Image (cartoon, rainbow, N blue to C red):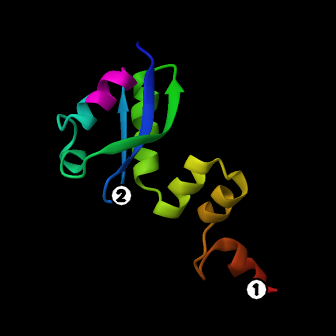
Amino acid sequence: MRKGYTYILKCADDSYYTGSTIDLLVRFIQHQSGMGANHTKKRLPVTLVYFEEHSRIDIAFNREKQLQGWSRKKKEALIKGWVEELHQFASCKNETHYLKFRRNKK
């Protein structure tokens, strides 16, 4: 299987687009020329702000799906390399979270 890339683009309207590909340069050129996804073609120009290289395209695709579920703040922490903030944004803040539940039971 071929290696793959997971990437995040920042669009002209300040939104983010997350994708995966086997050829990062070709895919970026497609996005930039309006031949990429519907989201990016309506929000040109785009800037590549983050990417990861993976040993297989299926791993890159699965990582894409994971990142697509993340909040904007969490994506920005990843882009900026802010590990501590990334963990902070990843933690559950719900009242029903098991750590809060255990604390309330004492």
Label 1 with label 2: CB-CB less than 8 Å: no
Residue extending farthest to the right is 106
Q: How many marks?
A: 2
Label 2 sits on residue: 15
| Image coords of residue 59 (percent x, y) | 46, 29
In the image, is residue 97 above or below residue 2? Answer: below
In the image, is residue 95 above or below residue 21? Answer: below
Residue drawn at (23%, 50%) of the image? 39
Disc 1 from disc 2: Cα separation = 42 Å
Residue nearest the viewer, comparing 64 with 104: 64
**Segment colored magenta:** 23-29
Q: Is residue 30 left or right of residue 99?
A: left
Residue drawn at (74%, 78%) of the image? 102
Residue nearest the viewer, comparing 13 with 51: 13
Residue drawn at (61%, 64%) of the image? 89
Mark 1 or mark 2, whichever is nearer to me: 2
| Image coords of residue 50 (percent x, y) | 50, 40
Using the rendered image of the protein, determine whether residue 12 is visible from the camera's viewpoint.
yes
Q: Amino acid at mark 2?
A: Ser
Q: Amino acid at mark 1?
A: Lys
Q: Is residue 106 left or right of residue 28?
A: right
